[in-house]
């Protein structure tokens, strides 16, 4: 294929360079088109626009491929863990044993929240959504560590490792602090022998007795975080990159990403799954009537299909097995879970869903697991944010290190043309 294409407008031809990615993706470089032709391109919602070149995550939705830094998600899920994958995303290579151990210690040592941040969380209105708490707390956390949030790129890039460890250590503590405060409870003392997810579960649901946490449960949570660690240029990640392009520090950029993820069209899918299951149960249905209603276009089956993956979501395949193991370990049995299993079985066997490739996605299984663990549904998106934080941080680092210009999209103005001002008395 030629390394150049021509765009013809009227009787003029404008050459456009062809950019080819390492996975043979092809794009037309239109960066000089406006200057050369006075035309801009229009792509509502950026669905067909490459806003950047990135080396972090690759997705092929048609083939069901997801890779972090070239490593297939299924292999990482089998052999790696969340914190190791964080280092992979940050640095581009699999970390050594010593690097992993040092990082674990650093994250653990920075998990205690500053007193001012705890006070801020306690002072927020009781009706504040957990995502609102998280966004505000991230900004406050940056304020508590001014040397890590200077808004000066060289300094912030130099302190990235420390800032990343702080954020990864603090976000679970922020979530647990808000949850416990809303119940007039205190967070139990941390346990030095707990890993990242065990410590989070202990802060959320444990007590001073330090009861043991089943590995199947903590491993399932670790897997959920790993599977959500990055997903290329989605709404919240693109928001993070845009904020970072203006020179903002990592704390401010991630707070913006949290706000984007808060939107129900982005971060609310697994909450919608639980809401659907509860509604099916309230109607006295075991799921069979709802399946038929979905086939007739009267109901929407939440947690099935994916905007990106036209095949099976690779993360869903992985999480299904962990879901079964975690539910067995938790000993949870409920009509809601029975309905979920009926929906899953019906959709995987019914030609209607098979032909349309409407398979269960990662949100279907994650919602079921998180509810079984005891997390309230309004915290599901916060858990999504914990998992996605390393991806946001990696993209912030990529922009701060290699970014060339502030992001500034164009628009097609469709408003009023110039008109004279009308004095108040004449309106």
Image (spheres, rainbow, N blue to C red):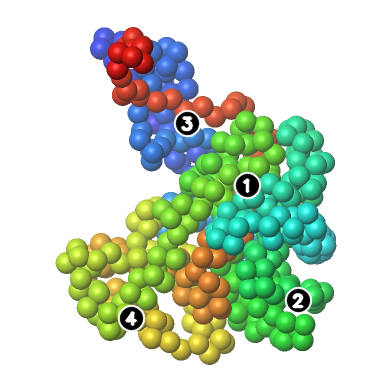
Q: Residues within 10 Å of mark 4 (few under 14, many from 20)?
A: some
Badge 4 marks a residue whose secondary structure is: helix
Marks 4 and 3, the one that precedes in the sequence? 3
Marks 4 and 1, the one that precedes in the sequence? 1
View extreme (left): residue: 296
Badge 3 marks a residue whose secondary structure is: strand
Disc 4 + disc 1, Cβ < 8 Å: no
Residue with the mark numbered 1: 254
CA–CA distance between discs 2 and 1? 27 Å
CA–CA distance between discs 4 and 2? 35 Å
Badge 2 marks a residue whose secondary structure is: loop
Residue with the mark numbered 4: 281
Marks 3 and 1, the one that precedes in the sequence? 3
Residue with the mark numbered 3: 19
Q: Residue at x 73, y 73 (%)?
A: 186
Q: Report the mark closest to the observer, 3 or 1.
A: 1
Report x, y in % for residue 323: 50, 78
CA–CA distance between discs 2 and 3? 54 Å
Report x, y in % for residue 371: 50, 76
CA–CA distance between discs 3 and 1? 29 Å
Left or right placement of residue 253 versus residue 361 in this view: right
Report x, y in % for residue 144: 79, 48
Q: Residue at x 74, y 55 (%)?
A: 117
Disc 2 + disc 1, Cβ < 8 Å: no
In the picture, the disc for residue 188 is 2
Report x, y in % for residue 286: 29, 83
Instruction: Using the rendered image of the protein, determine whether residue 322 is visible from the camera's viewpoint.
Output: no
Marks 2 and 3, the one that precedes in the sequence? 3
């Amino acid at each position: 294929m030629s390394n150049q294409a021509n765009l013809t407008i009227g009787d003029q031809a404008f050459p456009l360079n062809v950019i080819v990615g390492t996975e043979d993706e092809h794009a037309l470089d239109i960066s000089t088109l406006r200057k050369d032709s006075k035309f801009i391109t229009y792509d509502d919602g950026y669905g067909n626009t490459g806003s950047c070149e990135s080396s972090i995550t690759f997705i092929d939705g048609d083939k069901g491929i997801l890779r972090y830094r070239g490593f297939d998600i299924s292999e990482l899920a089998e052999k790696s863990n969340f914190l190791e994958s964080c280092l992979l995303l940050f640095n581009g290579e699999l970390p050594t044993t010593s690097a992993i151990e040092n990082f674990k210690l650093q994250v653990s040592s920075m998990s205690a929240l500053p007193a001012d941040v705890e006070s801020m969380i306690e002072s927020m209105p009781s009706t504040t959504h957990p995502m609102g708490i998280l966004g505000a707390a991230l900004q406050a956390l940056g304020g508590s560590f001014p040397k890590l949030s200077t808004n000066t790129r060289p300094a912030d890039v130099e302190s990235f490792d420390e800032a990343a460890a702080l954020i990864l250590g603090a976000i679970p503590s922020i979530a647990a602090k808000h949850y416990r405060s809303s119940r007039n409870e205190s967070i139990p003392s941390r346990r030095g022998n707990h890993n990242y997810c065990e410590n989070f579960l202990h802060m959320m649901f444990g007590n001073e007795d330090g009861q043991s946490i089943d590995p199947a449960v903590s491993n399932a949570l670790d897997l959920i975080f790993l599977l959500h660690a990055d997903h290329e240029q989605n709404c919240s990640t693109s928001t993070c990159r845009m904020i970072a392009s203006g020179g903002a520090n990592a704390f401010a950029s991630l707070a913006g990403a949290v706000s984007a993820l808060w939107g129900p069209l982005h971060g609310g899918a697994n909450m919608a799954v639980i809401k659907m299951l509860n509604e099916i149960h309230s109607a006295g249905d075991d799921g069979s009537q709802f399946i038929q209603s979905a086939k007739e276009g009267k109901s929407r089956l939440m947690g099935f299909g994916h905007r990106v993956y036209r095949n099976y979501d690779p993360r869903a395949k992985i999480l299904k097995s962990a879901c079964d193991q975690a539910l067995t370990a938790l000993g949870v049995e409920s009509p809601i879970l029975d309905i979920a299993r009926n929906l899953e079985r019906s959709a995987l066997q019914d030609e209607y869903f098979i032909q349309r490739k409407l398979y269960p996605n990662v949100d279907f299984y994650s919602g079921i697991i998180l509810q079984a663990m005891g997390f309230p549904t309004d915290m599901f998106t916060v858990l999504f944010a914990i998992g996605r934080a390393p991806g946001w941080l990696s993209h912030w680092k990529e922009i701060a290190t290699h970014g060339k210009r502030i992001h500034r999209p164009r628009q097609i103005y469709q408003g009023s043309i110039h008109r004279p001002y009308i004095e108040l008395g004449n309106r």
